Image (cartoon, grey):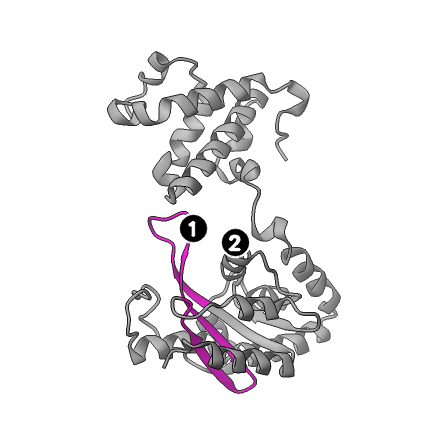
């Protein structure tokens, strides 16, 4: 069953404080939105695991306990999960252990899924078939809950196996430094002004083109956040790169591109032209470097 009341949540929080270690995973929907919608938080402490319903109970106290000194949060490929917590509550764990990162440090191909790691390291085969499940539905099925809880049940065992291997290879300090660097606002929540670096081909543009792309990508990010739409639904990367390459300065030049027609031109021309103008105005010594 789902944990959906404050009293039960408080019991989990007290268990976390007592054990000083907690495994965490989430289920969310990110399709067609800019801000992911969180529908489930899975938590393991010791040999117990719970599924918490964030649509029914305020999970802020649970997220905030992760930030308390001395408490370690164990995740697998947890950047998105931690990013959701950071975005909604402004909180980062005090210490983070990511089993996917640890696996890479001890020689596994990166990235390696949780199911493949539990099979290879623990000999445990996880359930399949619910990855694209509808987590917004209520009630959740027993199959959904079973699948979700498996995402945290084996994280401690993986952690212990990787800690042993990291020590044997003399890589513990290296791994810990990597985790400290990853568990920062700058690594988890990318500055919108730096999003242009995620557009494939950006570094091949000339300096002024990179400056224009930076302004276009930044404006697109703000619009997507305001409208709660994926950035690719505002303007996709290929068109953004093409605009930065051609750098049209008028509506007429914009309209020469067949994808800028009708309502699309009407809805986007103003901010696109403004961003291009801002990019052109960027002094040469302030244009983005290629690296």
Mark 2 Cα shell of 10 Å, populated few (<14), some (14-19), many (≥20): some
| Residue 291 percent across, percent down from the top left | 63, 35
> Does 114 sit above or below residue 254?
below
**Structural distance between the alpha carbons of marks 2 and 1:** 9 Å
Image point 46% across, 21% down: which residue?
274
Cβ–Cβ below 8 Å for labels 2 and 1? yes
From the viewer's side, name the closer residue of 39 and 253.
39
| Position of the N terminus by quadrant | bottom left
Helix, strand or loop under label 1? loop
Q: Position of residue 128 (x, y in %)?
A: 34, 73
Residue 26 appears left or right of 145: right
The residue tagged 2 is 87
> Which residue is outermost to the left?
262
Is 262 left, or right, of 21 in this rendering? Answer: left
Determine the residue positioned at 63% across, 56% down.
182
First in sequence: mark 2 vs mark 1: 1
Q: Is residue 277 above or below residue 35?
A: above
The front one of 231 and 247 is 231
Residue range corresponding to the magenta coloring? 26-54
**Residue topped by disc 1:** 35
Can residue 107 be seen by looking at this rendering? no
Helix, strand, or loop for circle 2?
Answer: helix
**Residue 263, quarter of the rendered image:** top left
Residue 163 forms part of the magenta stretch: no
Residue 135 placement (x, y as % from top left): 33, 66
Q: Residue 159: where, in percent of width, then height?
A: 60, 76
Residue extending farthest bottom: 47
């Amino acid at each position: 069953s789902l944990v959906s009341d404050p009293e039960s949540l408080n019991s989990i929080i007290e268990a976390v404080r007592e054990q000083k270690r907690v495994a965490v995973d989430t289920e969310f929907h990110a399709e067609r939105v800019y801000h992911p919608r969180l529908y489930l938080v899975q938590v393991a402490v010791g040999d117990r695991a719970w599924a918490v319903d964030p649509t029914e109970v305020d999970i802020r106290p649970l997220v905030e306990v992760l930030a308390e000194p001395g408490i370690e949060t164990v995740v697998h490929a947890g950047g998105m999960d931690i990013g959701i917590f950071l975005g909604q509550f402004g909180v980062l764990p005090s210490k983070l252990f990511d089993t996917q990162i640890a696996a890479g440090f001890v020689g596994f191909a990166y990235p390696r899924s949780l199911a493949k790691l539990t099979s290879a390291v623990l000999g445990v085969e996880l359930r399949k078939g619910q990855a694209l499940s509808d987590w917004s539905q209520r009630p959740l099925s027993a199959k959904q809950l079973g699948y979700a809880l498996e995402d945290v049940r084996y994280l401690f065992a993986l952690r212990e196996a990787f800690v042993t291997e990291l020590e044997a290879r003399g890589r513990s300090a290296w791994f810990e430094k990597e985790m400290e660097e990853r568990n920062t606002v700058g690594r988890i929540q990318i500055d919108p002004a730096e999003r242009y670096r995620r557009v494939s081909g950006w570094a091949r543009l000339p300096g002024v083109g990179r400056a224009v792309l930076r302004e276009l990508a930044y404006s697109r990010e703000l619009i997507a956040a305001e409208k709660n739409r994926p950035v690719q639904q505002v303007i996709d990367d290929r068109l953004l790169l093409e605009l930065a390459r051609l750098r049209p300065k008028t509506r007429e030049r914009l309209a020469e591109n067949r994808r800028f027609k009708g309502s699309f031109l009407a809805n986007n021309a103003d901010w696109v032209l403004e961003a291009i103008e801002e990019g052109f105005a960027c002094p040469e010594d302030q244009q983005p470097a290629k690296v």
